[in-house]
Amino acid sequence: MGRVTVRTRTIRLDLAEGSASARPDTLAVEEPLQLEVDGEQLTVTMRTPGDDVDLALGFLHAEGLLTGADDVVQAIHCTDVGPDGEPTYNLLRITARPGSRLAGPRVARPFTTTSACGVCGSASVEDVLARVPAPLHEDAVALRTDVLAVMPDTLRAAQATFERTGGLHAAGLFDADGTLLCLREDVGRHNAVDKVVGWGLRQGRLPLRGKVLVVSGRASFELVQKAAMAGVPVLAAVSAPSSLAVSLAREVGMTLLGFVRPPRANAYSREDRLVPPGAPEETGVGRCPTSVLT
């Protein structure tokens, strides 16, 4: 695995006093990862090194090219060398299972994606919607609001690299009882989610029924799409959702929460899955989709 952090020199400025001092700083690494499938270059994405196989599996699943981890026969890093003479691990070579969709013709996509890009390979929003599997309406998960309230702090406490750099997003997969099952960090929000979904694929857990996905930033359309493709019924973000994210969540039957900053949160869809402490789990709070839960 390549380096996750690097040290660099920085000038610390005191804006009030006008003083300056030199000191070292720790930065999160952002490097390209090139994905090859059966010798064909598929895409290049910017990411923080680490959990690259999970990242690739999650990305390919969101693109509709994987039905399970067994569609990939092998995934190995090519130990290319950087300017410092050290291996970069920035090329991942994937061998597809013969007869799988991954081994067949693939949809054309841009050559390079960035750490901020999610569904860059999709020709249109309609194409993405068409690839979302069966709606999540039938998932009967119940999430107590007091359990939801501690999830952001649990996520934050588990972010080891963020603690050193302050520069990474995180995605965490929880059971409805608040147990953290998997956490991944990356410079890109969508990469962190892909890494979590890829972990789920390798563990044979998809679809992720009854699970809660918590993300450290905003809830964009591509994050809802990736979560829906993985079968996640609840997506909670510490920041705002986009209008398209809300529309997609409502269409597929996902509970979408934004501004999850205890003691409050906004519920935008399927708020019936949320239950107050001590309430029967069969009944949700029954409030409108834009209500503030206290």
Image: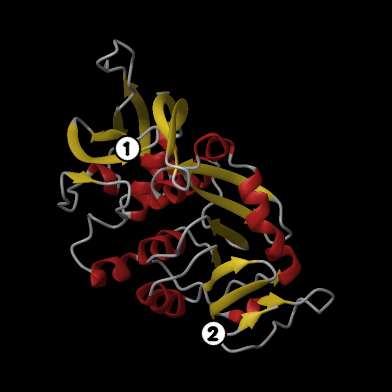
Image position, residue 151 (x, y; %): 66, 57
Taking the image as drawn, is residue 282 in sight? yes
Nearer-the-camera pick, 226 or 277? 277
Separation of residues labelled 1 and 2 (CA atoms): 45 Å
Specify whether 150 is left or right of 80: right
Packing grade of label 2 (10 A; few <14, some 14-19, many >=20) is some
Q: Quadrant of residue 164?
A: top right
Image position, residue 214 (x, y; %): 56, 58
Three-letter amino acid code at the position of disc 1: Arg
Taking the image as drawn, is residue 67 in sight? no
Q: For the point 25% across and 70% down, which residue is it?
A: 125
- Residues at marks 1 and 2 touching, judged by CB atoms closer than 8 Å: no
Q: For the point 34% across and 23% down, which residue is it?
A: 89
Q: For the point 55% across and 58% down, which residue is it?
A: 213
Q: Quadrant of residue 159?
A: top right
Image position, residue 93 (x, y; %): 28, 29
Which mark, residue 152? none
Nearer-the-camera pick, 89 or 17? 17
Q: Which residue is mark 1?
A: 97
Q: Which residue is mark 2?
A: 290
Q: How is the image coloured?
A: secondary structure
Q: Secondary structure at mark 1?
A: loop
Packing grade of label 1 (10 A; few <14, some 14-19, many >=20) is some
Outermost top residue: 85
